Image (spheres, grey):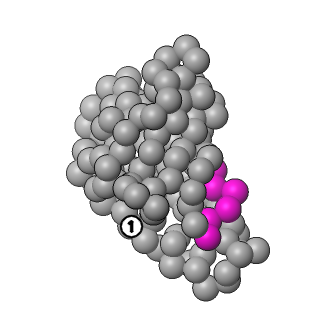
Amino acid sequence: MSQQKIEVVQDFSKPVGEVFAYLADHNNLRKVFGLPVRRVRDGADDVNGVGSVRRLGVGPLALEETVTALEPNRSIDYRISKGGGPVRNHRGKLEFSGSQRGSRVAWTIQFDTALPLVGPIIKLVLSQGIRQGLKRIA
């Protein structure tokens, strides 16, 4: 398997709490990813919290991500729980912190692919998409 790691860091002029609230809400992620995103299952304690599931995309190419851990204003962990094509063991983490400008988000994703050449392509497309998406909301 080909393991890949993506790290994207974006500064915001808004306070940590505001950026966290925006990115924790599944319904706001359409603006980041540029494709349909909707919550399909509420979390146990919060609609967007641990156990919540979001669906990204449409039709047979859609995938689902499940929030696995959430610490308000600090971090959100998730994994692909359905779909994903050649991507396996996909884990993502958003870490929130203060910065001189206001706040910072460090988004890290790790995943495997069974096909060696596919991993670097997915890594490139996904990292560029997240960078552009975070800039759209910065």
Q: Which residues are magenta?
A: 86-91
Say whether residue 89 is magenta. Answer: yes
Secondary structure type for disc 1: helix
- Looking at the picture, tell me which residue is in the foreground, 134 or 113: 113
Q: Amino acid at mark 1?
A: Gln
Q: Main secondary structure of the magenta part?
A: strand
User: Residue 80 at what x, y percent from top left?
Assistant: 59, 50
In the figure, is residue 37 to the left or right of 55? left
Image quadrant assignment for residue 116: bottom right
Image quadrant assignment for residue 57: bottom left
- Looking at the picture, tell me which residue is in the foreground, 98 or 30: 30
State whether residue 96 is above or below residue 121: above
In the figure, is residue 13 to the left or right of 5? left
In the picture of the structure, the residue carrying the numbered disc 1 is 128
Instruction: Report the quarter where the N terminus lies.
Output: bottom right
| Residue 23 in view of the camera | no
Farthest bottom residue in view? 117
State whether residue 81 is above or below residue 3: above
Q: Residue at 40% across / 58% down in the picture?
A: 59
Say whether residue 24 is magenta. Answer: no
User: Residue 53 at what x, y percent from top left?
Assistant: 52, 36
Q: Residue at 31% across / 55% down in the picture?
A: 35
In the figure, is residue 54 to the left or right of 50? left
Q: Mark 1 Cα within 10 Å, few/some/many (few <14, many 20+)? A: few
- Looking at the picture, tell me which residue is in the foreground, 130 or 104: 130
Q: Residue at 63% across / 34% down in the picture?
A: 68
User: Residue 36 at what x, y percent from top left?
Assistant: 32, 49
Instruction: Report the quarter where the C terminus lies.
Output: top left
State whether residue 92 is above or below residue 43: below
Q: Residue at 62% across / 65% down in the picture?
A: 87
User: Residue 132 at what x, y percent from top left?
Assistant: 30, 60
